[in-house]
Image: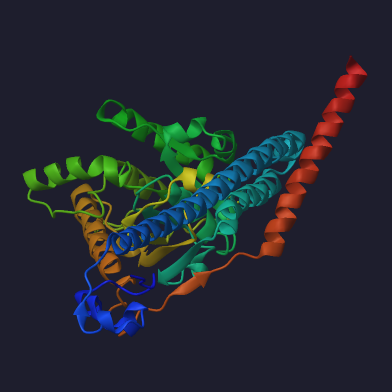
Amino acid sequence: MYLPFNIKLTPSLWRSNATIAGCSDDRFANKVIKPSSFDKRACALRRRGDYYQTVWITMAQLLDGTGKLGWTLLKAVLRFVFMFINNCVAIPSYCLYLLVLQPLRIWHSSTFWHLEGVMFKWLLAMVSSWGWIAGYTVTEWGDDVRPISEDEAMVIVNHQSTGDVCTLMMCLQDKGMVVRKMMWLMDHVFKYTNFGLVSLIHGDFFIRQGKAHRDKQLLYLKDHLDKYYHSRDRKWIVLFPEGGFLRKRRETSQIFAKKHSLPHLTHVTLPRLGATHVILKTLSTQHENGSVANESGTPNQTGKKRKGLQWVIDVTIAYPKARPMDIQTWIFGYRSATITHVHYRMYPIKEVPVEEQALTDWLYQRFVEKEDLLAHFYDTGAFPPPEGQKQAISRQMTLDPVWLCAIQSFAFVSGFMWYSLLRHLYCGMF
């Protein structure tokens, strides 16, 4: 019996006439035709064909996945090489320019630190460009902080990963003079990174965590602020009050909260008071009611009276699906294009208490609000609207690619210039 390969073998086809069976002999008409051994082989061949088709599809998917993996690895290697060279030309150039400008530091200190701030901003823009070219961008929510970019402010930020610093470097680039006149408070381990030397020269403070170091570190912080904050005309000071990454501190924070009947937090941890308290007391004057004043008696570089801290800016960073980005992601770019969301809320300094217990309660309340903001974001993909408004409005933060290319070009030209100059001097001496 002959049966076409593409006809499914079903009992309805077994009962067939001679025409269906491919035979004109009437002897086969109206008889039940049972599957022969040839029919069974046809079924086996069909099953084997389906198997081979599945194998080919699996192999195609595997090859496609291998190709994507290979491209990701190649891209990561190329990005690492570029950033390594970028660091090798930019950071030494920054240091050498400042070394040559040391006479200006003695003659006219304000001009020296102005130039240092400009180059510091350019270095942070280079770090921002690493994420920018990989598709890592920032969307901003809440208050617009650009109008207060020239006022003095303390910035408190939730801390999830090393990528938080890179995110801030990017989103503050378009905030006027903020980046070149800001001071960072970072964990002491950052001192040993590629950017540690730059931060030391700029005057950032590296704080060591742990009870054994806490009191001494706060004294060091106060001395550091007295010595460098006003003399270098700093405006914004950035700190992470949680004192560590969320994944490391969450369990300890929740145990502490349960023990002291404090709110149970999941997306943030309870902040530590020490550094915040020292900053407020050092950079502001205190009213009799325990709040801080708007005027400070400390002069700046030009001899004019400073206004002191005028704002506390509460910054909340949220990552899609609660997956923080770390510095490795920024360097290798192995994650697909990602939008990080940053929410701002401004508080006038006169609303911030300085007395220890009142400040503790105020700071805890800010992080309870952060918890609510993040919970809403992870549920809906957007931050809630401000009080009295029906819809939250977001703003896409942008960087000028021409400006980024110009800065990178200047860095490589500077690196080549310094290399040629030092090589010439070395050959001349030896």
Q: Nearer the viewer, residue 22 or 85?
A: 22
Let me know if residue 233 appears in the view: no
Query: Where is residue 48 shown, x and y percent of the image?
Result: 37, 56
The residue lying furthest to the top in this view is 430
Query: Where is residue 100 shown, x and y percent of the image?
Result: 77, 35
Quarter holding the C terminus is top right
Asked if residue 214 lies left or right of residue 428, the reply is left
The quarter of the picture where residue 9 lies is: bottom left
The residue that appears at 55% across and 44% down in the rendered structure is 73
Q: Nearer the viewer, residue 151 or 344?
A: 344
Query: Where is residue 79 shown, x and y percent of the image?
Result: 61, 45
Asked if residue 305 lies left or right of residue 388, the reply is right
The residue that appears at 40% across and 71% down in the rendered structure is 141
The residue that appears at 57% across and 58% down in the rendered structure is 132
The residue that appears at 40% across and 79% down in the rendered structure is 393
The relative height of residue 421 versus residue 259 in the rendered view (above or below) is above
The relative height of residue 11 versus residue 262 in the rendered view (above or below) is below
Q: How is the image coloured?
A: rainbow
Let me know if residue 408 appears in the view: yes
